Image (spheres, rainbow, N blue to C red):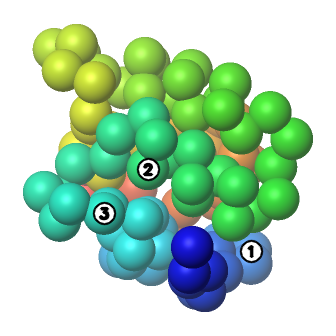
Amino acid sequence: MAFRRYRALPQGEVTVEEFTAWLGQFDGDGDRRISREELQRALWSLNLWFAWWKARVGVRAADANRTGAVEVGRLFAFAQSQLHVKIAQLGSSY
């Protein structure tokens, strides 16, 4: 099994583009949608406790049509509330 090195989430306030780029590196199938497993991998990269649970909560909250995967833009509220990420210019873009 090969280990892949991921870029870290920038510290402090991040832009929408930075957050999207950071989360996009975990999109294994390239469909621009994040599954629970992909979000779990992203949370593991942050060394968060209970990453599996937070990924489950995040996808459930953002997955309006219950497909099991969400668009990156729908995870902004989850990132702000659960990960305490400050995303700049969020009100005007999304």
Residue 16 visible from this viewpoint: no
Q: Is residue 2 above or below residue 16?
A: below
Q: Quadrant of the N terminus?
A: bottom right
Sooner in the amino-acid sequence: mark 3 or mark 2: 3
Identified at 36% across, 26% down, the residue is 62
Q: Classify mark 3: helix, strand or loop.
A: loop
Marks 3/2: CA–CA distance:
7 Å
Identified at 44% across, 18% down, the residue is 61
Marks 2/1: CA–CA distance:
23 Å
Q: Classify mark 2: helix, strand or loop.
A: helix
Instruction: Estimate how packed mark 3 is, as few (under 14), some (14 to 19) or many (20 or more) residues with alpha carbons within 10 Å.
Output: few
Sooner in the amino-acid sequence: mark 3 or mark 1: 1
Q: Report how many numbered discs are placed on residues in the image.
A: 3
Classify residue 2 as left or right of residue 25. Answer: right
Label ID, residue 12 = 1
Amino acid identity at mark 1: Gly
Classify residue 67 as left or right of residue 3. Answer: left
Name the residue tied to disc 3: 28
Label ID, residue 31 = none
Q: Position of residue 32 (x, y in %)?
A: 18, 58
Q: Is residue 36 above or below residue 46?
A: above
Find residue 5 and report its image quarter: bottom right
Amino acid identity at mark 3: Gly
